[in-house]
Image (spheres, rainbow, N blue to C red):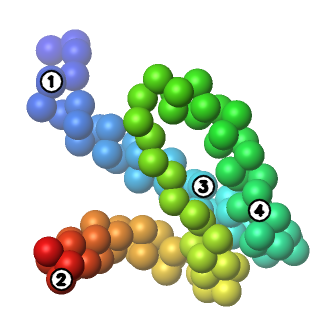
Amino acid sequence: MGGVDGNYKAVIAMVVLQCITAGVTLFSKVALSQGMSPLVFVVYRQSFATIIMAPLAFFSKCVTANNNTYFEGLNLSSSTIATAMLNLIPAITFIMAAVVG
């Protein structure tokens, strides 16, 4: 009764991940609203991610995508739209895979 049941660990992890994603999106929107260029922001973000993730990527197979369009879109729109678009990525990926075969 004191611990978390194994069935809820995945749900808790997904909720925590969504909260972190929302926080990063809000932080990004604030930085862009303060006048930071989206291209410079992507360079900083990718640089810090490389420094932090390089040891993990060295020992596993990690894939990264270019975020220039994401941050340019975040700069031109709201953080609500950016977060909603992140949730559409799996659906868009499925549609593209179905079309391509």
Q: Nearer the viewer, mark 4 or mark 3?
A: 4
- Residue at image mark 4: 41
Residue 36 is situated, as x and y percent measured from the top left of the image, at: 85, 69
Q: CA–CA distance between discs 1 and 3?
A: 29 Å
Whether label 2 touches label 3, CB < 8 Å: no
Does label 2 or label 3 sit earlier along the sequence? 3
- Marks 1 and 2, Cα distance to the nearest angstrom? 40 Å
Alpha carbon separation for disc pair 2 and 4 = 34 Å
The residue drawn where x is 22% and y is 22% is: 4
Q: Secondary structure at mark 2?
A: helix
Kindly identify which numbered label has been placed on residue 99.
2
Local crowd size for mark 2, using a 10 Å CA cut-off: few (<14), some (14–19), many (≥20): few
Position above or below: 26 against 37:
above
Residue under numbered circle 3: 24
- 74 or 1, nearer to the observer: 74
Cα separation, mark 4 vs mark 1, equals 40 Å
Q: Residues within 10 Å of mark 1 (few under 14, many from 20)?
A: few
Q: In this rendered view, identify the residue nearer to me: 14 or 62.
A: 62
Foreground: disc 1 or disc 3: 3
Q: Which residue is mark 1?
A: 5
The image quadrant of residue 88 is bottom left
Q: Residue furthest right?
A: 35
